[in-house]
Amino acid sequence: MAFDFGPFVHATFDLFYAVRTLPLEPGFTVRLPVYANRKIYAFHVEVVRRETVDHELLGPLEAVVLRPHDLLDGEPTGNGAGEVWVRRDGRHVPLRLVGWFRTTDHFRVGGIRAELVA
């Protein structure tokens, strides 16, 4: 079976790499189309603030905080909420993730917190 999504639709796995190439500064927002669960969603990312992250091994790192969420037919889907801290250099390496995310209609993971350790 083949699907024609049109140009520039992302898979869930390459979406974060696409976001990392963008000019991530406070006030910047972007919507990217993503295919997941047999639907095309509008994945919305808002850069909400700058922050310094105290990393155990690397010391203080300048970061920006992203607030991602997805929309289906213009409405928030409720699939998750959270924030992602990425380094404020050109590579935008993820440093921290806090939130909850639902991976399918029947499975919800709550209280996720991830930190870059090395």
Image: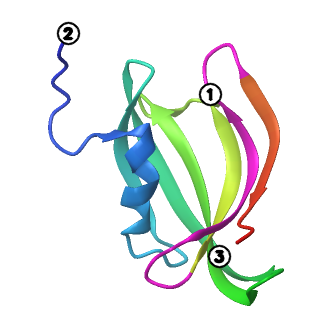
Query: Image point 43% across, 42% down: which residue?
Result: 13
Residue located beneath label 3 in the image: 49
Is residue 118 shown in magenta?
A: no
Residue 17 or residue 47, whichever sits in front? 17
To which quarter of the image does residue 79 belong?
A: top right
In the rendered image, residue 15, in percent from the top left (x then y), is placed at: 41, 49
- Number of dots carrying numbers: 3
Report x, y in % for residue 19.
42, 60
Q: Nearer the viewer, residue 29 or 118?
A: 118
Q: Earlier in the sequence, mark 2 or mark 3?
A: 2
| Mark drawn on residue 112 | none
Q: Do the numbered discs 1 and 2 sit on residues whose CB atoms are within 8 Å?
A: no
Q: Which residue is mark 1?
A: 103
Q: Is residue 78 above or below residue 61?
A: above
Label 1's element?
A: loop
Residue in the image at 47% along x and 49% along y: 44
Percent coordinates x, y for residue 89 in the rendering = 50, 85
The residue that disc 2 covers is: 1
Q: Which residues are magenta?
A: 88-107
